[in-house]
Image: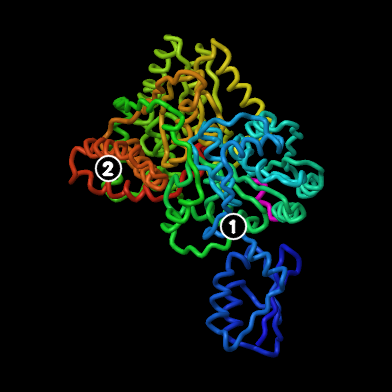
Amino acid sequence: MNISIKFVDTSLVQIEFEPDSYNSAFSNFFSKTFEGTHQGRYIVHTSSFIQKYNQVRNFFREFSNELTPILSQDLKNFITDLPSYESTTEQNLSEKEIEEKLVSSGFKRKLKWFQLRNVKFLNNLNCGANFSVPGAGKTTDALAFYFLKKNTGKEKLLIISPINAYLAWKDDIKACATNPSEIIKIRGSVEQVNEILLQEGEFFWTNYQTLQNENKLDNLINFIIRNGNITVILDESHRGKGPDISSRLIKLAPFPENKLILTGTPMPQEAADLRSQFSFLFPKNNILSDEDFVDAFQPFYIRTTDGDLGLKPLDIKYIKVKPYQAHEEFYETYVRQGLIDGLSLESIFKLNSIEYAYMRYIRFMSNPRSISDITFDIDAHLSNRLDEEGDGAKIDAVVKRASELALKGEKVLIWSSFVKNVERIASRLNHFGSEFIHGGVKTESTENPEEFEPWSEEDLETREAKITRFKEDSDTRILVANPAAAAESMSLHYQCDYALYLDRTYNAAHYLQSQKRIHRLTEGEERTKHIEIFWSDVIGSIDLRINKSLAEKCHQMFKFLNESKLSIEWVDHSIDLYKNNLLSTSVNEFHDEYMQSLDDIPSEPSGNLII
């Protein structure tokens, strides 16, 4: 039985056979693999065929005596030309030759020594990764990668990034290109996106949200197919994890000639975070175990470390804060004892979702008055006492410390994951010209909250104005920010030496990225940067459980990046802090067991939620 496999067009593959020549093995396999039958013909998206290619090939090998696949030559060529993680292109240009080629291609920025090393490495790849620490100039490296791949003058660059990175790309293109054309934003309705993609231009930009619309994604794929000499850069590529967005990236993955992914936090949760990023680079990969991606990535990434930048180590302090009396009493009576008695966190905090429940828990410990409607329903008398205690001991401690620093002339960055906390702290520090940044308020019923894009283009201008005031106005000494909105693409290292954390969540990428807002390369003498983490001094503190989880997650990532020495001390210290916080193992056995189960739940739905 002959099976004809050929392109309908570059985006679609047709698998055809004579309906009368029925083969049950073939029918069962293809119905299961590509979902459904079509009277002797399957029409599947090229990306789906490529993703399942190794399964298809193995199937035909198993039934070689009964089935003969006949691939069209253009499809064979397409599959052969797909980048393979089993081979690289060795160009072996010297650093001098790299610099000369960049200049001749229209690249004008002078690269630092570590950037030149990175670009030399990446030049040997059609598909690669730059996992350098934030602030090391990954956008410049990426643009140099693109310019080195130019040879006809008709190439195009497509950048996919969070919307808050747009201005950085716009500025860097102007700084790097000798004759930069305007970066074209791919936004709007399906019809508008289609019109935009027909424009003449070299640099195109869109955000992850655009990929969520199937019609817009198809337009992007057709744009890539029409423009053969195209480079696609995935910025903050760790955002590509999750079944929804990763499936869309995989659909796009087979078509660009050159691909590069950028992130300083490639594995913020677990090894599975690497799957979508690797599959974007190498859609034909045949790797089954998530753990295997750790080794498979090694030949394809480059990283600039803090040591390469000459940064001084962060000075990290943990500030213990005893809750006020009513707050501690409510915690002991209704939270800790509730967990010991076998209640779920959802039932304690009156929610149906564990993700939202633990966010409400964290918020309660940072600002008990912020959920007064819930506490009142549980215990009206105790809730009234909570209200009399004001914003709570943690906010009071953070405000006091920020005031001390501001009075000494320091500029201070304060982090909280909750909108009300951000606004309240900024309000209390208004006499220091405080500014705040958050991405907007969403409700608990929001669908797909992880896909929420925090900034519109209009909002972005306001955001940049706030950051500019913090940087340039001597009377603006406080900036309060939400990691979900501001942990990426904000550089404050020249102006600010102190970052205070009112609260943190299990999102390791947010925490590591937020640190790097002040801990980045400066042109001049490096200053010590100070991180101060405020934690609630109660038995079984959620703040210390989060710290332990973050340390362990980040340690796994640093092992992948061959930098585990950076995190061993953090892991040991976080474990000691948590164990010392548990006064009685027997009393806290259920609490600790339950809290361990929280370590494996997904990253928070959104740091901006009112919960």
Question: Which numbered marker is on residue 337?
Answer: 2
Residue 45 placed where, x, y %?
A: 68, 65
Q: Which residue is mark 1?
A: 247
The residue lying at 50 percent from left, 15 percent from top is 477
- Is the residue 122 above or below the residue 84 in the image? above
User: What's the coloring here?
Assistant: rainbow
Q: Nearer the viewer, residue 77 or 283?
A: 77
Q: Callout 2: 10 Å neighbours few (<14), some, many (20+)?
A: some
Q: Give the residue type that dot 2 points to.
A: Gln
Can residue 211 be seen here? The reply is yes
Residue 555 location, quadrant: top left
Residue 474 placed where, x, y %?
A: 54, 10
- Circle 1: element type: helix
Q: Is residue 381 left or right of residue 242?
A: left
Can residue 447 be seen here? The reply is no
Stretch of the chain drawn in magenta:
209-215
Q: Give the residue type that dot 1 points to.
A: Ser
Q: Quadrant of the N terminus?
A: bottom right
Q: Nearer the viewer, residue 237 or 281?
A: 281
Q: Nearer the viewer, residue 107 or 325?
A: 107
Q: Callout 1: 10 Å neighbours few (<14), some, many (20+)?
A: many
Q: Nearer the viewer, residue 440 or 269?
A: 269
> Which one is earlier in the sequence, the residue at label 2 or at label 1?
1
- Is the residue 86 above or below the residue 406 in the image? below
Is the Cβ of the residue at disc 2 closer than 8 Å to that at disc 1? no
The secondary structure that most of the magenta stretch takes on is helix
Residue 211 belongs to the span the image colors magenta: yes
Residue 223 placed where, x, y %?
A: 75, 52
Q: Is residue 121 left or right of residue 271?
A: right
